[in-house]
């Protein structure tokens, strides 16, 4: 008996059906778990006081580094702009 070409192929393996309760080793829901729309699970950890303090310190260090970078750029360009202004005034005065 020949199969018709438009007939879909049947799956070779039956799909595994996991019940909503999950397995005993992997509970379905945990307080630190978030479900995405695609059904995947994302686990997040609660931060302790030491980790929170470390993250705060890291953010402060980044803010200070950005501030020093901006101040450095300003302190380099201000004298250059002043020198160009003085040179332009002298050239205009001498004409």
Image (cartoon, rainbow, N blue to C red):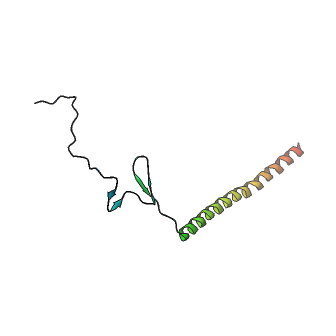
Quick one: 10 or 19, which is closer to the camera?
A: 19
Please tell me which residue is depicted at 60% across the width and 62% down the height of the picture: 59
Q: Quadrant of residue 73?
A: bottom right
Quick one: 7 or 33, which is closer to the camera?
A: 33
Residue 41: x %, y % from top left:
41, 54
Please tell me which residue is depicted at 23% across the width and 34% down the height of the picture: 8
Residue 47: x %, y % from top left:
52, 65
- Total numbered labels placed on residues in the image: 0
Q: Quadrant of residue 43?
A: bottom left
Please tell me which residue is depicted at 17% across the width and 28% down the height of the picture: 4
| Residue 37 placement, left or right of 88 | left
Quick one: 25 or 70, which is closer to the camera?
A: 25
| Residue 90 placement, left or right of 17 | right
Please tell me which residue is depicted at 12% across the width and 30% down the height of the picture: 2
Residue 18: x %, y % from top left:
30, 52
| Residue 77 placement, left or right of 24 | right
Where is 50 relative to 38, above or below?
Answer: below
Q: Looking at this rendering, what residue extends furthest in the left direction?
A: 1
Quarter of the image with the C terminus in it:
top right
Quarter of the image with the N terminus in it:
top left
Quick one: 15 or 74, which is closer to the camera?
A: 15
Q: Quadrant of residue 71?
A: bottom right
């Amino acid at each position: 008996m020949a199969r018709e070409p438009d007939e879909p192929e049947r799956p070779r393996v039956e799909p595994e059906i996991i019940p909503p309760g999950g397995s005993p080793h992997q509970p379905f829901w945990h307080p630190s778990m978030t479900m995405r729309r695609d059904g995947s699970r994302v686990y997040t950890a609660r931060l302790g006081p030491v980790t929170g303090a470390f993250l705060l310190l890291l953010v402060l260090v980044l803010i200070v580094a950005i501030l020093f970078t901006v101040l450095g750029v300003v302190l380099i360009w201000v004298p250059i702009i002043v020198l160009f202004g003085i040179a332009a005034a002298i050239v205009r005065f001498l004409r």
